[in-house]
Each structure stands twice: as C-alpha cells, then as structure tokens.
Image (tube, rainbow, N blue to C red):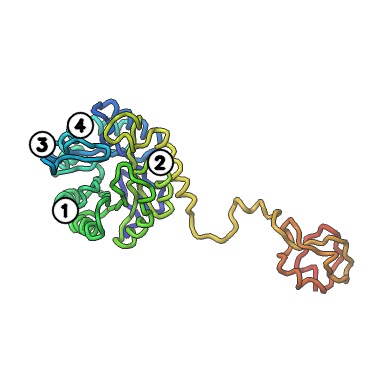
Amino acid sequence: MTPFITIDGRKIGPDYPPYIIAELSANHNGDINRAFQIMEEAKKAGADAIKLQTYTHETITMDCDSEDFQIHGGLWDGQTLYELYKGAHMPWEWHKPLFEKAKQLGITIFSSPFDFTAVDLLEELDAPAYKIASFELIDLPLIKRVAQTGKPMIMSTGMANEVEIAEAIKTAKENGCQELVVLHCVSGYPAPAEQYNLRTIADIAERFNVLAGLSDHTIDNATAITSVALGACLIEKHVTMDRNGGGVDDSFSLEPQELCALCKDTKIAWSALGKVNYERTEAEKGNVKFRRSLYVVKDIAKGEEFTPENIRSIRPGFGINPKYYYKVLGTKSTQDLTAGTPLHQKHFI
C-alpha cells in the first residue's frame, strides 16, 4: 500500500491528519451565492477541500415517468429521477466561477463526474483529483476514463459488494491510477450510525491494499471521529448553511459550526493515536510524586535492621519500588537515615 497520496500539495495517509472534504452537493439550492457562502464557511472551518457533483438531469437520467423512474419513500418521495436531478444539479456554467472562488479562498476544489462529458469539463478546469460516487462505482467505463487522467482518485463504496469494489479498484489501477483512497460508505440519507460497521475501514485497507476513509451520511460527527481510530485517513461530509433549508441534501448535512467541530475533533483523535508506547510520557513525568515508593518513616542508625516500623510504602515515588519491600526487611542500614529519606539500593546490605 502506498503510504500516502497527494492532492493539491496536501499529503493524505495514516501518518498525516485526516483530510476533510466538505461535500457541497446540491446544497446550493439553485443559488450560486449560496454555493460561494458554503465554500467560505468550509475554508473558515478548516476543511481541506470542497467537492462538487458534475452532472445534468439530461446526462444522469432521462425524462420518463414510467414506474422505473419513480421515487417512492425517503427524502425524495413522489419525484421522478429527472425531476430530482433537474432541481439538484449544479449548472455547468457555475463550475469555472466556483473553481476561481476556491483559488481565491485557498481551498482545494474537485468534483464527482457522472459521465465522460463531466470529466472533459473538469479536465478543462484542471481539477486536481476526482471522486467516484457510490452509485457510480459499478460504472467501470467511467472509472477507466477518470483513471486515464492520471489524477488521484477517491471512490465511495456504498451499495457495492466485495466483488464490485475489487473490480472498480482493478479498473482504476490498470488504467493509470497510482493514487487511490477507497471510502467506506452507507448509501442511506441519512444513514443510521449503527449500520455503519466501521470495522470495515481497516478491512478495506488490508483486503484491497489501499488507503481507506469514510464517506459519512450520519447526522452528527461521532461516527466520523470514531473512524479515525479505525484507520480513516480521509473523511467526507455533506455541508450546508441550514439543515432546514429545504434542499434535497440539507437534512443530512453539517452546518458550519458542526463542520468546524469535525475538523478540530478528527485532528485531535488522530493526534491521540500516536504510536505504541510504554514509556513515561511528558505529561506523566511531573506526577512521579503521586506514585508509591519505599521511605524511611522513623530514624534509623547505621547497622540497624529495617523493619515494618521504620520503612513503609508511601507517596511520593522517589524511592525504590515497593516490590522490594520484603527484600529490604531484615537487612541492615549502611548509614544513619532520618525519617523522610527515600530508600535506595545503597542504603541496605
């Protein structure tokens, strides 16, 4: 497994703080200024990147109202696929000003393309990376086209089984992708935390020999923060200005203050992982006085025998370890010792 990948100069891997992607998705709600505002908040919160979705209702589906195209239940009940994506898509003429805004803000921007024409547009804008959305993981021709750009790729695995994940990774690698992160994902909107099975993250990394991360559709940050301890080096969350804003993705997205907390808390979680260490830490070194050790509790003359009356295991911890108590008892002092003296090896024979 490659120890890290690099997107726009930022290294991503287990040895680096988690890479946080703020997914703008359809939360612009048809207003480019709202999209700009979300980008500004993402930068302010400390996110590493903002991600778009590049498709149109014409390229992702067709205008048909037969049963196959009807949505029943969930957030988008009663709409056809065409109606859903017509309202949710990001106009292609917005992409250039959004990329320019990201450059102005100093935040990385890239997108999920949903067909070849979307890849062509994003290549014209020199996108630094690509994301394959969960529902597109089985579109191997699309993965092949994206891999051929030579850019870093991120893949979400929602809905996919082990065979489909393996096929997607194989297709990417065989077509020029050398930098890849695979995200564990549950394609529910929102997704219950108890269905996330976060232990899968470490298994993805080991089973497929890739960097692994999390695409999180739960409604708070607990799942994402926990994922860091299980090896997630990249976390993606939907972001909005207002969870009650009425957009197609608003209800399961983070608001700005929650994104800020995510950026902060995932980095704390990562820094807490550290390394395997059994040595005394810096924070502990000043607390040795609160450990126990052997001390002289009654004046002892040179040659006098050590007894339970003149030595005890007490705090502080500047004497020898209490485990030597029975070894010391019955031996004789090499010198005069006053009460309050920490006992050491040189004091007994």
The picture places residue 90, in percent across and down from the top left corner, at 21, 33
Tag 1 and tag 2, C-beta contact below 8 Å: no
In this rendering, the answer to whether 120 lies above or below 39 is below
Q: CA distance from mark 3 to mark 2?
A: 35 Å
Mark 1 crowdedness (10 Å alpha carbons): few <14, some 14-19, many ≥20: some
The picture places residue 139, in percent across and down from the top left corner, at 16, 51
Q: Is residue 141 left or right of residue 188?
A: left
Residue type at mark 3 is Asp
Which residue position is annotated with label 1?
140
Earlier in the chain: of badge 3 and badge 4, it is 3
Which residue position is annotated with label 2?
220
Residue type at mark 1 is Leu
Residue type at mark 2 is Asp
The picture places residue 26, in percent across and down from the top left corner, at 25, 34
Which residue position is annotated with label 4?
87
For residue 125, the mark is: none
Q: So how many labels did they put on this image? A: 4
Earlier in the chain: of badge 1 and badge 2, it is 1
